[in-house]
Structures are given as structure tokens and as C-alpha cells.
Image (cartoon, helix red, strand yellow):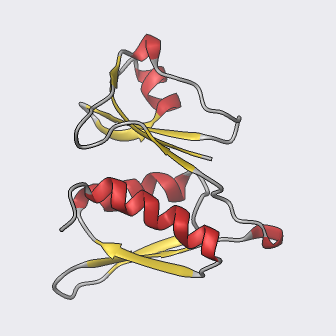
Amino acid sequence: MINSHSTDFLIRLKNGYNAGRKTITAPATKYCVNLAEIIKKHGFIADYSVSTDIPKVITLKLDYPLDFPKVTNVSLFSKPGRRFYEKSSALPWGKTKASLIIVSTSSGLMSQRQAKKQGLGGEIIAEIY
């Protein structure tokens, strides 16, 4: 039984890159599809697709430019037992310039940069770098 689909999804992404896989699959929820869209938009995966079968499965196509993985680590902020909320003025910056911090706001999932630009705070989900 999976307690947190977002945590499971992000850890599968990290483990897939560390294992050198070309594709990974995970249970598809609306939240995971939104996560995949943000991750693709920021260039951490090549593409994704959602199956029409039941149960729905999301397949991510991983990208390795110059044989190096694009994701080296995932830091999880919010967990099922401890949620991590911040105002827009207190949103953290990433460890590197290429880091992606995912924030769940009242306007949906977005990157930390988008949330700061729109003046939105929310739950900090994870950092991908």
C-alpha cells in the first residue's frame, strides 16, 4: 500500500536514473501527471505518457545527455506525517541554479520560481537536482 503517491513517484524517478533505466512506470494519479508535466517542462525527463488501461499507469522516458543522468538526487520536504508550508517570501532557493523546487499552491503545482513570481506560498513538496 502506498501512503504518498507523490513521494513514491519522485523516488521511482531518482532510482530509475541511478539504475540507468530508459523508462520507468508508476501508478498514474492526477497529482503524479501534474508532477510529470512540471518535471518535463523543466527538462528533467524527455517525455511521459499515461496509459488508458485500468489501473492507469504513467510511463516516464528518462533522458541522459552525454551519458550523465539529469536527476542526481531528490530531497523530499513534505512527508505524510510532516507537511512543510512557507509564504512566498520565505520559499527556499535550490542547492544549484538548475534545481527545481516543486510547490503545491492554491493555483496548483508549480515551480518555486513561478510561485515567487505570482506571490503564492504553499506546501513545498520536493527539490530535484
Q: Residue at x 36, y 15 (%)?
A: 87
Q: Position of residue 33 (x, y in %)?
A: 33, 62
Q: Quadrant of residue 115?
A: top left
Residue at image point 53% right, 29% down: 113
Furthest residue toward right: 66
Q: Residue 102: horizontal and vertical position, in percent? A: 44, 40
Task: Answer with left or right where residue 17 lies relative to residue 51.
Answer: right
* Looking at the image, residue 36 lies above or below residue 66: above
Say whether residue 72 is visible.
yes
Q: Quadrant of residue 123?
A: top left
User: Whole-percent x and y of residue 13?
Assistant: 49, 65
**Quadrant (top left, top right, bottom left, bottom right) of the N terminus:** bottom left
Farthest bottom residue in view: 53
Q: Residue furthest top?
A: 89
- Residue at x 43%, y 58% (from the top left corner): 10
The image shows a total of numbered marks equal to: 0
Relative to 35, is 4 on the left or the right? left
**Is residue 110 shown above or below 62?**
above
Q: Please name the residue shown 53% across and 67% down the image.
A: 15
Q: Quadrant of residue 21?
A: bottom right
Please, is residue 76 above or below residue 82 in the view?
below
Work out whether residue 1 or residue 92 is closer to the camera in this orientation and state it: 1
Percent coordinates x, y for residue 95 in the rendering = 66, 33
Instruction: Say if residue 46 shows up in the picture.
Output: no
Q: Is residue 102 left or right of residue 73?
A: left
Q: Is residue 116 above or below residue 6?
A: above
